[in-house]
Amino acid sequence: MDLTRSLDPHLAFGAGPYSCLGRSLARTELQTVLKVLLKRLPTLEPAVPADSLARREGLVGGGLQQIPVRW
C-alpha cells in the first residue's frame, strides 16, 4: 500500500487477480434498489431527452453526470 501515490479518478471493478471482491454485492444492491424504486414510483421517467444528458469523461466505462427524473 502506497499512501503517496496519485489518486485514480475512476471507479472500476477490475479483472482477473485485481477483480473487486465486492462487485457482485454492488451489482445485486443496484438491481434491488432499481427494482424497488421502479415498483414504488411506476411513473418515474427521464425529465429531459436522452440526447441532452451530459456525459462524464475520463471514466473507464463512461457514464452520465446526472439524470434528471420526474414522476
Image (spheres, grey):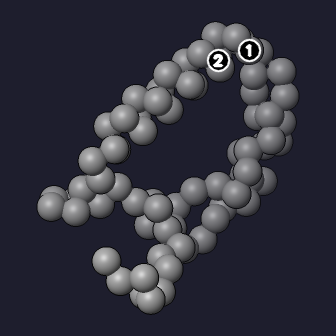
39 over 58 or under it: above or below: above
Identified at 44% across, 89% down, the residue is 4
Where residue 9 sits in the image (x, y, percent)? 53, 73
Q: Is residue 2 left or right of residue 15?
A: right
Q: Quadrant of the C terminus?
A: top right
* Secondary structure found at label 2: helix
Q: Quadrant of the N terminus?
A: bottom left
Kind of residue indicated by mark 2: Leu
15 over 22 or under it: above or below: below
Neighbour tally class for label 1: few under 14, some 14-19, many 20 plus, Cα within 10 Å: few
Where residue 60 sits in the image (x, y, percent)? 44, 66
Identified at 75% across, 22% down, the residue is 44
Q: Is residue 6 left or right of residue 65?
A: left
Q: Is residue 48 left or right of residue 1?
A: right
Which label is found at residue 12? none
Identified at 66% across, 61% down, the residue is 55
* Secondary structure found at label 1: loop
Q: Can you name the residue that lies furthest to the left here?
A: 17
Q: Nearer the viewer, residue 21 or 68?
A: 21
Are discs 2 and 1 less than 8 Å apart at CB?
A: yes
Where residue 5 sits in the image (x, y, percent)? 42, 87
Identified at 74% across, 14% down, the residue is 41
Q: Nearer the viewer, residue 28 or 65?
A: 28
Which label is found at residue 41? 1
Q: CA distance from mark 2 to mark 1?
A: 5 Å
Which label is found at residue 38? 2
Where residue 37 sits in the image (x, y, percent)? 65, 20
Q: Quadrant of residue 56?
A: bottom right
Q: Quadrant of residue 49?
A: top right
Kind of residue indicated by mark 1: Leu
